[in-house]
Image (cartoon, rainbow, N blue to C red):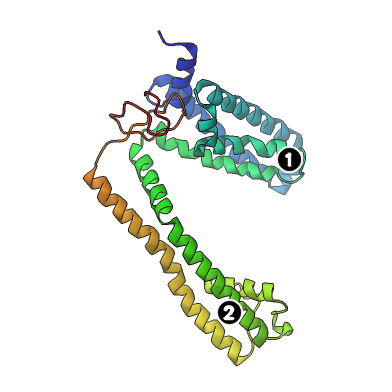
Amino acid sequence: MKSSRNRLHEIIFEADTPAGKAFDVALLWLIVLSVLTVVAESVPEWGATYRREFELIEWGFTVLFTLEYVLRLAVVKKPWHYARSFFGLVDLLAILPTFIALIVPGSSSLRIIRILRVLRVFRVLKLVGFIAEAKQLQSALRASRRRIIVFLSAVLALVTILGTLMYLVEDEQAGFSSIPRSIYWAIVTVTTVGYGDIAPRTVAGQVIASVMMIIGYAIIAVPSGLVGVEMIRGNMLKTENARSTSTQACPSCGKDGHDSDALHCKYCGHRM
């Protein structure tokens, strides 16, 4: 006979049982309603007229989400593992802004981060294919992180050099009043954003700007290529080692994404 802790774990973490699916669907509705509340509160007319009502509703959501977070930590055997997981951090960030707003006025809008919790819909609707694809993207980003860091370091050096060069070529009246401001212009230009708040006026400055714009197109394509190569490699490995993914969460650490035939958690080793 299952203990009350195991029954709570099935309800809170599993989407394969009627009770678990009902819990997750109710949670998703609460998340959507809480996000809509934050959006509605930002409208000046509504925020001023219904300020008290918004505060009561927000504290109601915060109490419910806090209780849910505590229960999630209580039903897993290794709470620290769940607390450090992606959803564990998102669950914590969903409740922190309300308490932070008591100390730092104006920070309540950070509650919009709760929208990340809607990602649970993939598990609730048993869209395990989306879970597998998300993990593949995560693996591709992790595998290419060193090359991306090297690439970003090179870009940072480039915009620093060219920004400083523009500071020497252009004058303060054109907006290049300091090296940091010139580097800001270089970043805006090389990323092809082009706000237009600062623009070179001399021929030399315009030549440098033209070169940076051309370089910018090449720079944009590099990160996509780095991640794309890893995703193709991941697809090849996935084809060679094709296995279905389960929505079952580990009763110890709370992580999911295991193979359907897995007997033990691949993160903590606990028996599934």
**Label 2 crowd (10 A; few <14 / some 14-19 / many >=20):** some
Quarter of the picture containing the N terminus is top left
Looking at the image, is mark 1 or mark 2 earlier in the sequence? 1
Quarter of the picture containing the C terminus is top left
Q: CA distance from mark 1 to mark 2?
A: 41 Å
Badge 1 element: loop
Against 238, residue 64 (above or below) is above
Q: Amino acid at mark 1?
A: Ala
Q: Is residue 198 left or right of residue 258?
A: right
Task: Judge by depth and name the residue closer to the eye, 147 or 184.
Answer: 147
Task: Judge by depth and name the residue closer to the eye, 57 or 237.
Answer: 237
- Identify the residue position indicated by label 2 in the image: 162
- Residue 172: where, in percent of width, then height? 73, 83
Q: How many numbered badges does the structure rendering display?
A: 2
- Residue 127: where, in percent of width, then height? 36, 37
- Identify the residue position indicated by label 1 in the image: 101
